[in-house]
Amino acid sequence: MPTKKTILDFQEMKKKGEKVAWITAYDFPVASFAEQAGIDMILVGDSLGMVVKGYKGTIPVTMEDCISHSQDVRRGAPNTFCIGDMPFMSYQTSCQEAVANAGRFLKEADMDAIKLEGGIRVCDQIKAITEAGIVVFGHIGLTPQSSGQMGGFKAQGLHVDSARDLIKDAVAVEEAGCEALLVEAVPPEVTEFITEKLEIPVYSIGAGLPCDGQLLICGDMLGMFEAFTPKFVKKYANIAEDITRAFEEYVKDVKEEKFPEDEHVYHIKDSQEDFDKLFNEFA
């Protein structure tokens, strides 16, 4: 059994230059596979809206969705550091609601931390949640919950002015109490500067190599999610093709009566004569 890491371990890994590998997961099987593979952390992301539920984005995802999937993941990965993702409108309206919803991830799903999107504008919520004793991961750059304001799912920090805003956000969330920061869809030069400037671990999802670790969405890296593939994704498998091929073969076997074969059925224990008598009773 792996030893579950803590936020202190991730801070120490940053000091030593040891990279952290983490993925998103939304269910028991993938979480269990991730733990067996030695994944450092699992994020139960609100990306479940697209990967699992087929929404166009993350906006429709509810707290109930996130709590339920977090419970599934915890059962699959009991010895892995797991992070619950705060969905849209679960923390924006007030600090009190933010703390209450963050607490649900710990009380109801046994998460080790929560993640929320935004920089300076959510610092009050970050401070309130951390003061309640909950570990908070920040998330800046391309923040899907705010993609409407960004004109879509677009990379951030490509120009000096937007990079300056990102750096301000990074500094602000660290000062507010975040113990780690996720940077999404940002040029490596900006990511590297933020990583060196902050004392907390800084992780990348599509933000380049020079940081403290990498995150990928499981559906993307496994080739399960076919609607689109972000530029920054490396596919380590193509499960969608394998599953489709398996279904096609199954359909063919059923139509041609090649399945089930003798090895796939149960056999009677009494004699055929006894069963014939039984069937005659109802004939």
Image (cartoon, rainbow, N blue to C red):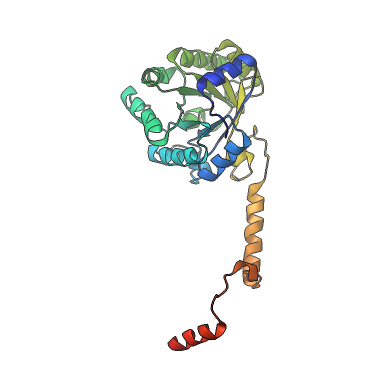
- Find the residue positioned furthest to the left: 96
Any part of residue 73 in sight: yes
Q: Residue drawn at (48%, 23%), measured in percent from left and top?
A: 137
- Find the residue positioned furthest to the front: 270
Q: Locate residue 211: give its quadrant.
A: top right
Q: Is 266 displayed left or right of 104 in the figure? A: right
Residue 274, horizontal then vertical, whole percent: 51, 84
Number of marks in the image?
0
Q: Residue drawn at (46%, 32%), measured in percent from left and top?
A: 85
Q: Residue drawn at (51%, 21%), measured in percent from left and top?
A: 7
Any part of residue 90 in sight: no
Above/below status of 245 relative to 120: below
Q: Locate residue 233: give its quadrant.
A: top right
The image quadrant where one finds the N terminus is top right
Above/below status of 198 relative to 222: above
Residue 76, horizontal then vertical, whole percent: 51, 41
Q: Locate residue 208: give its quadrant.
A: top right
